[in-house]
Image (cartoon, rainbow, N blue to C red):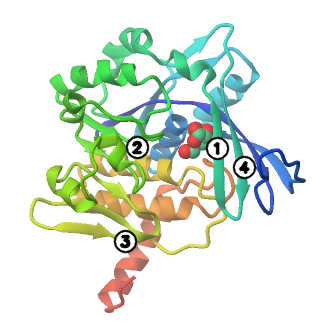
Amino acid sequence: MQKIAVVGSINIDYFVEADRLPKLGETLLGNSFFLSLGGKGANQAVAASRLGGSVALFGSVGDDENSKIILENMKKEKVTVNNLNVAEGTTTGAAFIELCNSENRILVVPGANNLTDVSYIKTVSEELLNYDVVLFQMETPLEMMEYIVPVLYDRQKTIIVNPAPAHKIRQDILDKITYITPNEYEYQMVLDSEDSMEALLEKYPNKLIITRGTDGVSYFDGQALINVPVIKVEAVDTTGAGDTFSGAFAVGIAEGKKLRESIRFANVAAGLSVMKKGAQTGMPYRHEVELLLKEEEEHENKGHVI
Ligand code: RIB
């Protein structure tokens, strides 16, 4: 099993739940309020660890009460945080999430996440090179990724980028990424192209993986377009589903699973994650994903299509 490093954002999520979202200028009474642990980087690290990955998180938190809660949680989740930057006089990142009928709207105040920059990554780059699979998202400064991706590429690391929130990625950086996993709304912006989904998948075989919500996950295997279906579940909260997909996908790749198998594993994990409220709360453990995969396999062997 290869070792996984996640480089990315760490937040406390402040959720408010309501029957509908307020209009601009409107005051609306919500139903409940809760705090949860989040940040795309932290979420992906937790997802990967729960699924059996050997995981370290690289990123920044402030020197406030929230960072203590986060560090405690990472210990519980068996995620290595030795290289985390605890920045003095800074606040930990915070996300304000409005939840309504399982869908969400998120506003992020990056705080310490802005310090996961080029100078930080230079101080931990030797340590980062001890990992085989490195997973990024884009809630931390883009220049940091542009600096470190070529270094990792030269050392033949597997580089996975979940380009959320979406930004254009420079072609020379894109060329060095092993797998990139935008969703159906992000891929054109990330790849800076108006070409169709099919054309872009063919342009980046076995590399561009587009997550399409309930329509499954698509990639081009060099011969044909492949669509890997998702599982059908009653969603309670989709926050963090994409992060669960990314963390689980990294575990599949780190274990040497084939691309299709890694995506299937990630789809099942992401499906299970939306059944509880909060980004990390519903993230499944390894045995839960395996049980569902086994049940589906048995179902398919009996001739049913899931
Ligand atoms: O992807 C979900 C995450 O996005 C939340 O946990 C929130 O912190 C934001 O970073």
Q: Nearer the viewer, mark 2 or mark 4?
A: 4
Determine whether the residue tagged by mark 3 lies in a helix, strand or loop: loop
Asked if residue 300 lies left or right of residue 201, the reply is right
Q: Is mark 2 within 8 Å of ligand 1?
A: no
- Residue 121 occupies quadrant: top left
Report which residue position mark 4 lands on: 98
The x and y percentages for residue 192 are 29, 41
Report which residue position mark 2 lands on: 53
- Residue 259 occupies quadrant: bottom left
Q: Which quarter of the frame holds ligand 1?
A: top right
Determine whether the residue tagged by mark 1 lies in a helix, strand or loop: strand
Q: Is mark 1 within 8 Å of ligand 1?
A: yes
Instruction: Name the amino acid, label 1.
Output: Ile
- Residue 135 occupies quadrant: top left
Image mark for residue 229: 3
Q: Would you say the residues marked 4 and 1 are in contact, meaning their CB atoms lie under 8 Å apart?
A: yes
The x and y percentages for residue 176 are 20, 32
Q: CA distance from mark 4 to mark 1?
A: 7 Å
Instruction: Name the amino acid, label 4.
Output: Glu
**Upstream in sequence: badge 3 or badge 4:** 4
Q: Would you say the residues marked 3 and 4 are in contact, meaning their CB atoms lie under 8 Å apart?
A: no
